Image (cartoon, rainbow, N blue to C red):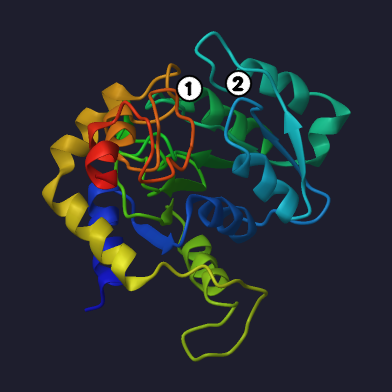
Amino acid sequence: MNPVTLFEQELAEYLGSPYVATVNSGTAALHTAGLATGIRYGDYVITTPYTYPPTANTILMMGAIPVFVDVDESNLLDPEKVEQILRTGLGMRVRAVLPVHLFGRSCDMDAFLALKDRYGVKIIEDASQGFGAEYKGKKLGTFGDAGTYSFYATKNLPAYQGGAIATPHKDVYQNCKYIRRHGMNEDGVMVTMGYNYEIPYNNAFHGWQYLKLHKTAIEAELGTYDESNGYYKYLVYEHPWYQDNKGLWVNTGCPNAESSSKRVRETCA
C-alpha cells in the first residue's frame, strides 16, 4: 500500500471522517474543496478578512467573489453578522460560507450549521490552524460539507508541505480525487478540469508516521498557538528559516545569521 493511502486512512480514522483526500498544500486543499462542493464562477463566498491570504485567494481562483464579514470578540467569523448578509438580496448569491478556525480555537459550528439548514449554503471549514482541535467532542473540519487542513512545516502536524480535505460526502470525495489528478478518473479518462495537486509520496510518508507516533504532541501543540506569534511557537523556534517569535518568515542567511533560535545557530555553525 502506498504512503498516500496509508496517510489518508490514518487521517480518516483520527478525524472520524468517512472520506479524506490529501493534496500538496493547504491552499490546494481549499481550492479543491471549493470546486468539489460546487462553487463556480460568479458565486459569492462569505469568509473572514482575519486569516491568511489563501483563504480569499482560492475563492478568487475559482472565479467566485469573497464577501468579508467581521469577526466576533474571539477574532473568529461571527455567525450573526453572516446571517445579516444572508438575509439581504446579496445573500441570494451566496453559495458557501467559509469559517476559519484560528489558533486552535473553534468557530461556533452549531450556529454555522443552522445557517446551512436555514439558507441552503455550503459550509467549508478552514481548519489549517485547528488540526486535532475539537468542538463539543468532534474534530474541527468534520462538521460541514468539507474541511481543509495544512501540513506545512509550521503546523502541528508537519509533513514539510501538504494538505487534506475531509468530507462526509462520497461525491465530494470523488470530485477531490479527480481534481487533484488533472481531472482524471481511475481509468485515466479526463472527466473534469483538474490540477497537479497530488501530495508527494515522501511528504505523505512523513505525515503518516508523524500522525501515528505523535498524536499526544500534535494535540498539546494546539495550546501554544496564539496571536502573539501566529504560529505554533515551538515548531517556529526550532525551524531554521524562522528568525524569532513574531512569526516572521525570514531566511536567516547562513552562516552569519543572528537569531534567537538555538537550532538556527547550530544549523549555521
- Give the vertical position of 106 relative to 139 (above or below): above
Q: From the viewer's perspective, tell me whether residue 104 is left or right of residue 98.
A: left
Residue 92 in the image: above or below residue 38: above
The secondary structure type at the circle numbered 2 is: helix
Quarter of the rendering occupied by the C terminus: top left
- Classify residue 106 by image quadrant: top left
Residue pointed to by mark 1: 108
Q: Position of residue 225 (x, y in %)?
A: 35, 25
Residue type marked 2: Pro
- Foreground residue among 31 and 16: 31
Task: List the single residue furthest toward the right.
Answer: 89
Amino acid at the residue labelled 1? Asp
The structure residue drawn at horizontal position 27% and vertical position 62%, both measured from the top left corner, is 7
Distance from Cα at disc 2 to Cα at disc 1: 7 Å
Quadrant assignment for the N terminus: bottom left
Circle 2 sits on which residue? 79
Q: Position of residue 50 (x, y in %)?
A: 61, 25
Q: Secondary structure at mark 1?
A: loop
Q: Is residue 122 visible?
A: no
Residue drawn where x is 67% and y is 40% of the image: 56
